[in-house]
Image (tube, grey):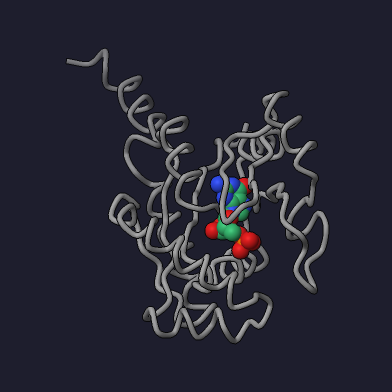
């Protein structure tokens, strides 16, 4: 039987490039799965249903909450976002490390419910770079950009509660750093009780 995978929460401000990094990681490193969230926001140009998000109505979203099919959910800039539970459970049981790319409120709901989860904050090299990336994306109106900046000022106080930072200066390097964090986490003594069990089984009876 394979060992259960790790639950990894990746957050970061809009424009930090977290989805590029997580997509790159899942594509190029073995043993990872990326959770696809449900959202009530409209698809951006180029986004694909079932790949970037499951785009649902507010009514459908409320049904998902009522039927307890979300691990967590949050309201963010006037829309709902949530993590479907079944896929995550299935992948963890298969031994894959599952990445949830979610915002701050959802991250701490996950940490409360699953204290084993690892919280990682992806950062751009500077706030200046980040705001520039957001504007260069040209997918949001200035009003929406301002809403996202206001959201950042509400969120930034929570950043020190994340366990790791991953700097995203270049996507390949950021993915390598994220993989290093997750692999080190998987070697923590409390995550490997079978090693001590084996030692005890052998030595426990000897004096
Ligand atoms: P965007 O609209 O830019 O795709 O996402 C807005 C924010 O919602 C991002 O910070 C993203 O990480 C977060 N988000 C995406 N999916 C989920 C989810 O399932 N739950 C929560 N809590 N946040 C999510």
Q: Nearer the viewer, residue 203 or 130?
A: 130
Horizontal relation, residue 6 to residue 205: left or right = right
Which quarter of the rendered picture does the C terminus lie within? top left
Q: Would you say residue 98 is visible in this rendering?
A: no
Q: Nearer the viewer, residue 38 or 118?
A: 38
Which quarter of the rendered picture does the N terminus lie within? top right
At horizontal 47% and vertical 66% (from top left) the residue drawn is: 13
The image position of residue 74, as x and y in percent, is 56, 43
Find residue 82 and report its image quarter.
top right
Establish if 115 lies above or below 57. Answer: above
Residue at the extreme front: 143
The image position of residue 126, as x and y in percent, is 37, 80
At horizontal 55% and vertical 73% (from top left) the residue drawn is: 145
The quarter of the rendering in which ligand 1 is drawn is: bottom right
Horizontal relation, residue 98 to residue 127: left or right = right
Find residue 200 and report its image quarter.
top left
The image position of residue 106, as x and y in percent, is 50, 44
The image position of residue 35, as x and y in percent, is 66, 49
At horizontal 72% and vertical 33% (from top left) the residue drawn is: 62
Residue at the extreme right: 49
């Amino acid at each position: 039987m394979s060992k259960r995978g790790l639950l990894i929460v990746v957050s970061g401000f809009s424009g930090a490039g977290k989805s590029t990094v997580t997509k790159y990681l899942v594509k190029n490193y073995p043993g990872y799965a990326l959770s696809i969230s449900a959202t009530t926001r409209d698809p951006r140009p180029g986004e694909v249903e079932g790949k970037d998000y499951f785009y649902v109505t507010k009514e459908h979203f409320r049904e998902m909450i009522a039927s307890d099919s979300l691990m967590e959910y949050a309201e963010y800039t006037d829309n709902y976002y949530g993590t479907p539970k079944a896929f995550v459970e299935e992948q963890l049981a298969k031994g894959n490390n599952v990445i949830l790319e979610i915002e701050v409120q959802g991250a701490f709901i996950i940490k409360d419910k699953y204290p084993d989860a690892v919280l990682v904050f992806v950062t751009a090299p500077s706030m200046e770079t980040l705001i520039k990336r957001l504007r260069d994306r040209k997918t949001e109106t200035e009003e929406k950009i301002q809403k996202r900046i206001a959201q950042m000022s509400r969120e930034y106080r929570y950043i020190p509660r994340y366990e790791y930072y991953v700097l995203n200066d270049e996507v390949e390097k950021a993915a390598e750093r994220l993989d290093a964090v997750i692999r080190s986490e998987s070697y923590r003594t409390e995550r490997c009780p079978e090693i001590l069990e084996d030692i005890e089984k052998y030595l426990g009876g000897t004096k």
